[in-house]
Image: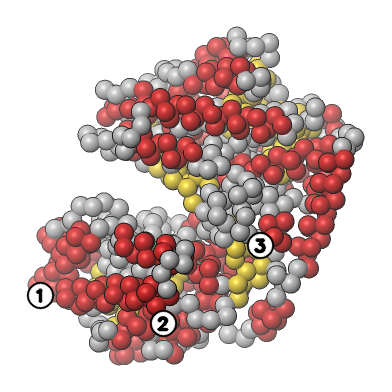
């Protein structure tokens, strides 16, 4: 048996079986027994995959019906009061999704991934009490299936560190009682077998921790590792290095440390300490975050480097993190270009890489099949190095010669020219871009994709939508109109499909939250734009009205952050290629008479590094690339951008440096609080704070929005403010949208008249 280890495996199913059965259950089509049945089949299938790939350390409790943090909240009995009358699956899904009486718990991004977890709610009075058999049941299920698993648990420090306090108390006040519950659990687990391995996931340790949190590590793991002599404790971190924690953990009685050597190369700095402590090192070398085929020999070299410091006998070869963040398998990608496919590796394929890497590293004998896999791996990686599909000399040259990287006029001059040209009023009203994606629109797109209707028929329907959308916006008196984005399925995919260097899969789904999956584009090669991507549609919309139509683009940083990005080029260089493509689109739009252009950077914040030391570098290239993407805009072309979140305090200077003429942001749920930071730093550019929340079907009243606008005016002057909803309207229904926007325009009129 190879000494190898998988941090965790995805669970949604290679055909999204879990998603489908959950959604049928929620809509009342099947009962919970059916969900359980599918879940059990999936667990067994995933164990079988790992077993047949000869993985020695396979997980249990990496499965979840919805989310592992939610499972942990239930395990520890930290149920918020509003759910206390519920039990079993009713309780579980109400916490995740809300029910008639109680709102769902909050959901937020898991570190720098696109996975979202359910945020535990903790108060001073939270009582913890072991409350679930899931961990034990799953271990037994695996054992019955002849797989002896290691058991995955969310570590207590990460659990409390990611919890939100509902009363401003310190969540770590509860560390002792949480650890006490874990100790009880470990006692129960110790009875299950002669030897039990428990993996505590502590990704919080890759952040810059304060001394208070660091001081918890030793007492907590001293306790957990001493519960029973037959329990071996693993502490797993990923996505970055965790050196501060490692230096502490080597002095505790844990058995092993799992570290990420793909995204945390600084973990190299603590190898001596690990060796001196005699701990086992679980070395994460197979990338659990990206989709490219490992270069097997390079991975073995990496392990050999590690083995110069840590005895080989103490090393287990592992994935860098759970494979949850990559799609299941390439098997269904029958339409993918065969070269591109040969460069890829998803979860199932990564298991085979792991096997081969560990065999080579431990000098085990290779089978004929291993040998041919190794040969293929070398050939595929070679072909990727100089494939003309990937490398495009023209763009590389164009970028190296590029002279203009940003707009040359200062904001003060630009805004003067723009105000003269557009003559919009103060508190100008607009929207963020998309209007409801109706059944008809989706059907139209599907039928066109499947060649059931002609291009003419398809375009005719889009034009009809645009006609209606423009007519509606005119009818309620909005100042700046949009075409509504009916031709776009998704704000990244749409552009990816029109740019070279992007590929799309049929089935490469990754869980985003609960039953929701995303299928990110693959940026496999140099990105170029051959033809305009949006000009015809926006021009058409403009031809239907005398009012200003704002063109809509997605920014380079967002396109990058929502894709699987090639790993043979630094991310900033990939972003630069995308930025150049967008710059050309901006130029084509303005030459076609579209002088107001929004370049959305919805995911700008998502790319932030986990460690403070890396932030300024990211901010620098992210800002530079945004500026490059709008660099061709003339003085009187007005550039808007949009970001959909509400935490700007730490990044306001960066936002300012992006230097968009207008930025729209999400503020409706935070009143005028968020805006204060703009005032505080003396932000000059114009700002469109959302005046109503688009995440809910509720129609806000005129009065309510008048109040909201007045609150905004307490912070920034009317000359600097735009009025718009929080975000795009594509997930809403027309009747709500019509009423809400009509009320919004009325509210603005009322405020203007009062002045
Ligand atoms: N223009 C996009 C839309 O309106 C922006 C979406 C977003 O910010 N997520 O849908
Ligand atoms: Zn948004």
Quarter of the image containing the N terminus? Answer: top right
Query: Which is more toward the observer, 285 or 427?
Result: 285
Residue 49, picture quadrant: top right
Could you tell me which residue is drawn at 33 percent across and 35 percent down? 29
Of the residues under marks 3 and 1, which one precedes in the sequence?
Answer: 3
- Residue 228 image position (x, y, % from top left): 63, 12
- Residue 436 image position (x, y, % from top left): 29, 62
Proximity of marks 2 and 3: CB atoms separated by less than 8 Å: no
Q: Of circles 2 and 3, which is in front?
A: 3
Q: Residues within 10 Å of mark 3 (few under 14, many from 20)?
A: few
- Residue 80 image position (x, y, % from top left): 32, 29
Q: Which residue is mark 3?
A: 337
Could you tell me which residue is drawn at 45 percent across and 32 percent down? 65
Q: Which residue is mark 1?
A: 753
Of the residues under marks 2 and 3, which one precedes in the sequence?
Answer: 3
For label 2, the SS is helix
Quarter of the image containing the C terminus? Answer: bottom left
For label 3, the SS is loop
Could you tell me which residue is drawn at 73 percent across and 34 percent down? 53
Of the residues under marks 2 and 1, which one precedes in the sequence?
Answer: 2
Q: Residue furthest front?
A: 452
Q: Which residue is mark 2?
A: 536
């Amino acid at each position: 048996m190879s000494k190898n280890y998988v941090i965790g495996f995805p669970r949604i199913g290679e055909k999204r079986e879990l998603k489908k059965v959950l959604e049928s259950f929620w809509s009342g089509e099947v009962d919970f027994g059916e969900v359980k049945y599918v879940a059990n089949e999936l667990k067994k299938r995933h164990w079988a995959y790992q077993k047949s790939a000869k993985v020695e350390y396979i997980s249990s409790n990496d499965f979840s019906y919805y989310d592992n943090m939610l499972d942990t909240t239930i395990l520890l009995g930290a149920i918020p009061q509003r759910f206390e009358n519920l039990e079993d699956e009713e309780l579980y899904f109400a916490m995740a999704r809300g029910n008639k009486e109680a709102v769902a718990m909050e959901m937020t991004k898991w570190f720098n991934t696109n996975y979202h977890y359910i945020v535990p709610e903790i108060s001073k009075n939270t009582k913890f009490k072991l409350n679930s058999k899931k961990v034990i049941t799953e271990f037994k299920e695996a054992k019955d299936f002849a797989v002896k698993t290691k058991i995955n648990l969310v570590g207590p420090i990460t659990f409390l560190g990611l919890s939100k306090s509902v009363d401003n108390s310190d969540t770590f006040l509860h560390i002792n009682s949480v650890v006490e519950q874990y100790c009880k659990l470990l006692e129960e687990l110790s009875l299950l077998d002669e030897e039990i391995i428990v993996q505590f996931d502590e990704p919080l340790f890759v952040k810059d921790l304060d001394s208070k949190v660091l001081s918890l590590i030793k007492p907590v793991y001293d306790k957990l590792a001493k519960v029973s002599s037959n329990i071996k404790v693993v502490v797993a971190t990923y996505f970055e290095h965790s050196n501060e924690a490692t230096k502490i953990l080597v002095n505790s009685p844990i058995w092993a440390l799992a570290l990420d050597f793909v995204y945390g190369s600084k973990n190299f700095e603590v190898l001596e300490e690990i060796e001196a402590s005699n701990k086992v090192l679980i070395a994460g070398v197979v990338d659990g975050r990206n989709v490219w085929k490992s270069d097997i020999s390079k991975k073995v070299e990496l392990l050999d480097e590690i083995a110069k410091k840590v005895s080989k006998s103490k090393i287990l070869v592992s994935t860098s993190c759970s494979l949850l963040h990559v799609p299941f398998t390439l098997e269904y990608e029958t339409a993918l270009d065969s070269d591109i496919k040969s460069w890829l590796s998803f979860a199932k394929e990564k298991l085979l890489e792991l096997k081969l890497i560990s065999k080579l590293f431990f000098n085990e004998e290779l089978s004929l099949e291993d040998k041919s896999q190794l040969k293929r791996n070398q050939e595929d990686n070679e072909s990727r190095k100089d494939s003309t599909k990937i490398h495009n000399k023209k763009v590389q040259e164009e970028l190296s010669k590029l002279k203009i990287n940003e707009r040359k006029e200062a904001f003060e001059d630009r805004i003067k020219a723009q105000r003269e040209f557009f003559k919009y009023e103060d508190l100008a009203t607009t929207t963020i871009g998309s209007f409801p994606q109706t059944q008809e629109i989706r059907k139209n797109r599907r039928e066109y994709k499947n060649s059931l209707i002609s291009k003419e028929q398809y375009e005719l329907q889009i034009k009809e939508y645009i006609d209606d959308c423009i007519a509606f916006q005119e009818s309620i008196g909005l100042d700046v109109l949009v075409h509504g984005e009916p031709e776009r399925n998704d704000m990244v995919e749409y552009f990816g499909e029109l740019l070279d260097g992007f590929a799309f899969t049929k089935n490469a789904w990754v869980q985003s939250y609960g039953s929701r999956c995303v299928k990110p584009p693959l940026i496999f090669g140099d990105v170029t734009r051959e033809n305009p991507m949006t000009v015809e549609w926006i021009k058409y919309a403009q031809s239907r009205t005398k009012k200003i139509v704002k063109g809509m683009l997605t920014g380079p940083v967002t396109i990058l952050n929502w894709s699987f990005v090639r790993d043979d080029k630094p991310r900033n260089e990939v972003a630069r290629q995308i930025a150049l493509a967008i710059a050309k689109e901006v130029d084509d739009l303005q030459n076609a008479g579209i002088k107001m252009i929004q370049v959305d950077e919805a995911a700008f914040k998502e790319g932030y590094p986990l460690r403070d030391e890396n932030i300024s570098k990211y901010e620098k290239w992210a800002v530079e690339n945004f500026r490059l993407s709008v660099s061709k805009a003339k003085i009187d072309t007005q550039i808007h951008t949009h970001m959909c979140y509400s935490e700007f305090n730490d990044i306001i200077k960066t936002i300012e440096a992006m230097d968009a003429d207008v930025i729209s942001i999400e503020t409706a749920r935070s009143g005028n609080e968020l805006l204060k930071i703009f005032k505080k730093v003396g932000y000059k550019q114009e700002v469109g704070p959302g005046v109503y929340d688009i995440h809910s079907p509720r129609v806000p009243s005129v009065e309510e929005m008048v109040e909201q606008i007045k609150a905004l005016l307490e912070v920034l002057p009317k000359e600097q403010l735009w009025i718009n909803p929080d975000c795009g309207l594509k997930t809403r229904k027309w009747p709500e949208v019509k009423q809400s926007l009509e009320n919004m325009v009325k509210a603005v009129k009322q405020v203007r008249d009062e002045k």
